[in-house]
Amino acid sequence: MSREEEYKTCNIDRIARKHVQQEQGHLLIHLYKQMDFKELSKITNMTELQLLGKITILEAAGFIKSVESEVKTEGNIVEIYKKYIITEKGRNEIRYMNLSNELNRQNQKKNKPIRNLLSLLNKALT
């Protein structure tokens, strides 16, 4: 099955898990596929634009790092592939989230969308 067929028949979670295995621990996020963004936005409960913003914030904060990107142009369609890994700082944040008690969870509600996305990335990597 080609990657193109995979995207038409699978959801983002299964695609991410499959690619994680193929890419030895790297989470492959294909930002160019509208279906992927729609699926990911459903899972995280964010709009596609919010999701792109959150990924940018996670990268700027040092929680994830882009290790590879590739741009392909075919006619008037531009495809951007980006591969991210969760950094040690991101892993520490995930550990902190997992260990936090109820009081901390109440305080973390402000950052819930970012924490949801980090949790999703963590699940895809494990």
Image: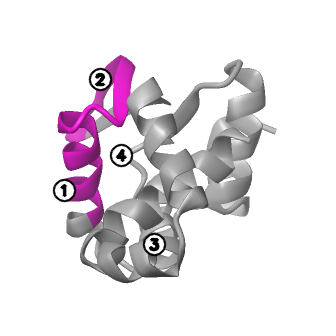
Q: Is residue 73 visible?
A: yes
Q: CA distance from mark 3 to mark 1?
A: 13 Å
40 up-or-down from 91: above or below: below
Residue located at (59% from left, 58% from top): 99
Circle 3 residues within 10 Å: few <14, some 14–19, many ≥20: many
Q: Are marks 4 and 3 in contact (CB under 8 Å)?
A: no
Specify the amino acid type for callout 4. Answer: Tyr
Residues in magenta, as a range: 51-77
Q: Earlier in the sequence, mark 4 or mark 3?
A: 4
Residue 96 location in percent, x, y?
Answer: 49, 51
Circle 2 residues within 10 Å: few <14, some 14–19, many ≥20: few
| Residue that badge 4 annotates | 32
* Secondary structure of the residue carrying numbered label 1: helix
Residue 44's disc is: 3
Q: Earlier in the sequence, mark 3 or mark 1?
A: 3
Residue 102 location in percent, x, y?
Answer: 51, 81
| Residue that badge 2 annotates | 71
| Residue that badge 1 annotates | 53
**Labels 1, 2: front one:** 1
* Secondary structure of the residue carrying numbered label 3: helix
4 up-or-down from 120: above or below: above
